[in-house]
Image: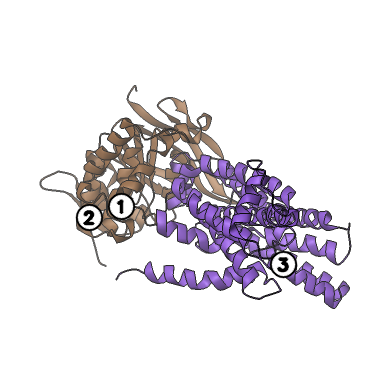
């Protein structure tokens, strides 16, 4: 899986509007890592190292993070339709981002991310409040998430229709569908910290998640402090999702589908499912990013469109093959 | 008095304004099988959850072998008490062995490996419910009776001293009902079983506790509890009770009128 990941990342750094040979790419990366001092054109080196590699790695981490969150929420909420945005986080992030884009609260790209992050977290706080600090059942939490998402989506629409112009509306739509266009190394550094921390917490609780197989009360009977575990894991998934959404927009589908694909490959036990989801999500997202750059020349298709277009047929195959034999 | 395992004093619990369990005090002896009967909504399930520490009482307390359960962590409690829900379901397709392995959760830390004690407990539990040949089979392919046996095996894998079962024979045919209850009776554990079938309760339980409107109205030997007047009073049925020829336990015959 790691080999596959390295391969697609290398592929992603090779493919682009500006043609650079694979050999040059390898040299540019090893230069960047300080392993070699090969003499290659600085502009090519810069494109590979500063633009494409950071982009590919952020894509990989985003895919890993979203898939991980999806796997966790599907287990905690015992709902196969659960995904990272079920807690209203992406809707909150869009409201925050729209406040920045349209209302101009703050300015510049940094405050767009900050706005999105603030929005994401206020949505999560609202959901936590509505579901009594995670003490009530899964369906209650899902309903709270749906309510919060509706509220924030309505706010977003309200702001766009009352204050925005056509160009701003288009900006907002593109942002919502997600893009890896603007990411650079500082994004990667922040994201890898969040993902590594999140993955560590989740792996630590992997066996506890297995105990939720037969529901919350059953988990409690197996000695799991249910309310506390739920709150911790909701907070971790909200943090990962909010970070990703504030950086690259709300990329759908990955968090929903990849955990199912991973479950199909490695089975439902979380000690294997969580790393497998993360790895598969990373590979899938990098591939989707490549596809988004090559399908339409001279422009980039929003990544959220690609994940759905590529993901749905792929998912259909899994559903078909995993159908009950009776 | 030394053989007392569960001691509940003045348990009261409710939701909102509604009191569901009122002032129940109860003793259960070591290795005893106590049946819990009562009409729908009489508070059997709630009482079972209070005893197992899954709900916190509004007032009163539960002691397990002399220790107040409110002072124990969920995890410490789960090493002593196992709880079998009525027909707990899952969409996840684990194997029988994987489901039974979940029973070891309270004994394992996040990083500990699979120990020989874990393996022994799981193997013994699977053997106890006679599922050795099917241990690799997927959960979704099991029948209702097999699933209930696997749930009991999972509870046994917790290595508990006390097991609570909430209507474990629901939805099972009569053969499997008897099989499950015989298994529970023969376990080397203290068990508290909520049941609907009065004759099965009478056949398999050492003592029977009767709930009505949240209160405990009787708790004694089957022959003392299963009387025509009590059945009329609690269940509002007309029945004839006579001792069974072979076991001597009360046998209940319902009258259709």
Q: Which residue is mark 1?
A: B148
Chain drawn purple in the picture: A
Residue of label 2: B176
Mark closest to the chain's N terminus, 1 or 2: 1
Near-viewer residue (A53 or B256)? A53
- The front one of A109 and B236 is A109
Residue A140 visible in the current orientation:
no
Foreground label between 1 and 2: 1
**Mark sitting on residue A176:** 3
Give the residue displayed 71% in from the left and 63% down from the top.
A91
User: Compared to B200, does B115 lie above or below?
Assistant: above
Q: Position of residue B160 (x, y in %)?
A: 35, 34
Q: Eyeballing the image, is A297 above or below B68?
A: below
Q: Name the mark nearer the viewer: 3 or 2.
A: 3
**Chain letter belonging to callout 1:** B
Mark 3 element type: helix
Percent coordinates x, y for residue B162 in the rendering:
35, 35
Q: Are marks 3 and 2 on the same chain?
A: no
> Marks 3 and 2, how far apart in space?
56 Å
Whether residue A213 is visible to the viewer of this picture, yes or no, is yes
Spatial separation of the CA atoms under disc 1 and disc 3: 48 Å
The percent coordinates of residue A191 (x first, y second) are 67, 48
Pointer 2 local density, CA inside 10 Å: few below 14, some 14–19, many at least 20: some
Q: Chain of mark 2?
A: B
- Horizontal side, residue B161 vs residue A256: left or right: left
Subunit under mark 3: A
* Residue at the extreme front: A39
Spot the brown chain and give its letter.
B
Examine the image and state in which quarter residue A174 appears.
Answer: bottom right
Tell me the residue at 52%/32% (across/down). Answer: B70
Q: Secondary structure at mark 1?
A: helix
Q: Residues within 10 Å of mark 3 (few under 14, many from 20)?
A: many
């Amino acid at each position: 899986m790691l080999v596959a990941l390295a391969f697609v990342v290398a592929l992603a750094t090779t493919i682009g509007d500006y043609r650079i040979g694979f050999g040059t790419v390898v040299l540019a990366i090893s230069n960047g890592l300080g392993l070699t001092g090969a003499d290659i054109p600085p502009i090519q080196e810069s494109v590979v190292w500063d633009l494409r590699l950071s982009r590919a790695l952020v894509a990989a981490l985003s895919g890993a993070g979203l898939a991980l969150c999806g796997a966790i929420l599907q287990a905690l909420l015992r709902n196969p339709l659960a995904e990272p945005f079920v807690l209203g986080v992406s809707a909150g992030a869009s409201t925050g981002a729209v406040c920045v884009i349209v209302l101009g609260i703050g300015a510049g790209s940094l405050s767009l991310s900050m706005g999105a992050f603030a929005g994401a977290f206020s949505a999560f706080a609202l959901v936590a409040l509505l579901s009594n600090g995670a003490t009530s059942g899964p369906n209650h939490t899902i309903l709270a998430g749906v309510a919060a998402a509706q509220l924030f989506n309505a706010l977003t629409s309200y702001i766009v229709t009352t204050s925005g112009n056509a160009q701003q509306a288009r900006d907002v739509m593109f942002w919502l569908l997600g893009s890896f266009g603007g990411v650079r190394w500082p994004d990667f550094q922040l994201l890898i910290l969040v993902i590594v921390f999140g993955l560590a917490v989740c792996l630590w609780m992997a066996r506890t998640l297995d105990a939720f197989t037969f529901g919350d009360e059953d988990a409690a009977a197996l000695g799991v402090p249910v309310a506390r575990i739920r709150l911790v894991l909701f907070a971790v998934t909200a943090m990962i999702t909010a970070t990703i959404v504030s950086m690259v927009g709300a990329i759908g589908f990955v968090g929903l589908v990849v955990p199912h694909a991973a479950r199909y490959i490695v089975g439902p036990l979380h000690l294997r499912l969580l790393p497998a989801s993360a790895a598969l999500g990373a590979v899938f997202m990098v591939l989707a990013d490549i596809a988004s750059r090559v399908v339409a020349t001279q422009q980039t298709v929003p990544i959220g469109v690609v994940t759905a277009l590529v993901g749905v047929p792929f998912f259909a195959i899994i559903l078909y093959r995993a159908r009950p034999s009776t | 008095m030394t053989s007392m395992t569960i001691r509940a004093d003045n348990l009261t619990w409710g939701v909102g304004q509604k009191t569901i369990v009122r002032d129940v005090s109860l003793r259960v002896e070591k290795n005893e099988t106590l049946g819990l009967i009562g009409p729908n909504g009489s508070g059997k399930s709630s009482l079972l959850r209070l005893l197992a520490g899954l709900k916190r009482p509004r007032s009163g307390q539960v002691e397990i072998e002399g220790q107040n359960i409110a002072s124990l962590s969920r995890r410490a409690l789960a090493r002593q008490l196992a709880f079998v829900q009525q027909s707990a379901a899952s969409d996840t397709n684990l194997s029988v062995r994987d489901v039974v392995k979940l029973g070891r959760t309270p004994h394992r830390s996040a990083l500990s490996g699979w120990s020989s004690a874990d393996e022994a407990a799981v193997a013994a539990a699977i053997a106890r419910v006679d599922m050795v040949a099917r241990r690799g089979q997927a959960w979704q392919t099991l029948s209702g009776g097999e699933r209930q046996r696997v749930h009991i095996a999972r509870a046994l894998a917790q290595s508990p001293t006390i097991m609570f079962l909430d209507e474990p024979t629901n939805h099972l045919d009569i053969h499997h009902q008897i099989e499950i209850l015989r298994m529970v009776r023969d376990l080397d554990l203290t068990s508290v079983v909520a049941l609907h079938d009065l004759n099965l309760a009478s056949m398999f339980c050492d003592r029977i506790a009767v709930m009505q409107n949240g209160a405990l109205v009787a708790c004694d030997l089957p022959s003392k509890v299963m009387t025509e007047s009590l059945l009329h009073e609690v269940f509002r049925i007309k029945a004839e009770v006579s001792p069974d020829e072979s076991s001597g336990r009360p046998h209940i015959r319902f009258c259709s009128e």
